[in-house]
Structures are given as structure tokens and as C-alpha cells.
Image: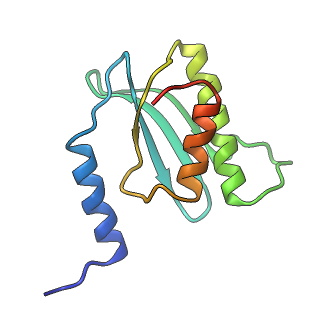
Amino acid sequence: MATLTVRKARERRHKRVRGKVSGTSERPRLVVTRSNRGIVAQLVDDTQGRTLVSANWLLVKKTFKGNKTEQAAEVGRILAREARKEGVESIVFDRGGYLYHGRVKALAEAVRGGGLKF
């Protein structure tokens, strides 16, 4: 039996989650994408196939000092602020196959702290 690589295991988890999670205009899907350098978060309406709000690590000020977990939390705060401007109050969380730990958890908790419910 062949063993799964880390990337293949994440893709497999992501497919399983995406089969169950879908965003609407009332409750858009919060998509998290993580890289070695930063993190990206988007609110997506799957019924219309469009992105409502997005935030990424490049929007964090250049003077920001902190590690990547703090960077992810700052991206979550930016996303929550922009989503509230758009009138979004409730979302569905799609962790993208990543484990709910570290940067993904920090982003999710910052979004919750910004006033969005999921």
C-alpha cells in the first residue's frame, strides 16, 4: 500500500470538506490558503461564483513586526472588518484541508473576534 505525501493528504482532506461545505450570499464560505510566506483568506459566494471580500498577508503593514501566526491573526482582523462593511455577519469556515492549528486557528479566532459568526 502506497503512503500519502503531505500534499496529497491535504488535497484529500480538502476534497472531503468541499463536498460538505458551500457558501451562499447570506453565509459565504471563508476560504483559507496558506503558503510558506503568508496566508490568504477570502469570502466566497458559491451560488454566484464570486469573491465578496479578500485579505492577504501583503495587506499587513510593512512596519508590522511579528511571527507568521500573528500575521495570520492580523489578516483575520482585516477580513472581518471588510466583511462587516459588506454586511456579512455569518460565514461557513473552509479550512482548505489544513489542520485547525497554528496559523489557521489564529486567523479563525481573529475573524470571530472581529464579529463574524461560524
Q: Quadrant of residue 81?
A: top right
Left or right of 28 in this view: 111: right
Q: Quadrant of residue 114?
A: top right
Q: Is residue 86 above or below residue 116?
A: above
Q: How is the image coloured?
A: rainbow
- What residue is rendered at 26% in x and 78% in y? 4
* Residue 58, x across and y down, in percent: 67, 46
In the picture, the quarter occupied by the C terminus is top left
Q: Nearer the viewer, residue 56 or 16?
A: 16
Q: Nearer the viewer, residue 15 or 113?
A: 113
Q: Is residue 22 above or below residue 37?
A: above
- What residue is rendered at 56% in x and 22% in y? 83
Which residue is most to the top?
87
Which residue is most to the bottom?
1
In the picture, the quarter occupied by the N terminus is bottom left
Left or right of 74 in this view: 11: left
Q: Is residue 58 above or below residue 92?
A: below
- What residue is rendered at 59% in x and 41% in y? 109
User: Could you tell me how many numbered marks the image carries?
Assistant: 0
* Residue 19, x across and y down, in percent: 20, 44
Left or right of 19 in this view: 116: right
* Residue 31, x across and y down, in percent: 43, 41
Left or right of 104 in this view: 47: left
- What residue is rendered at 54% in x and 25% in y? 116
Q: Quadrant of residue 11?
A: bottom left
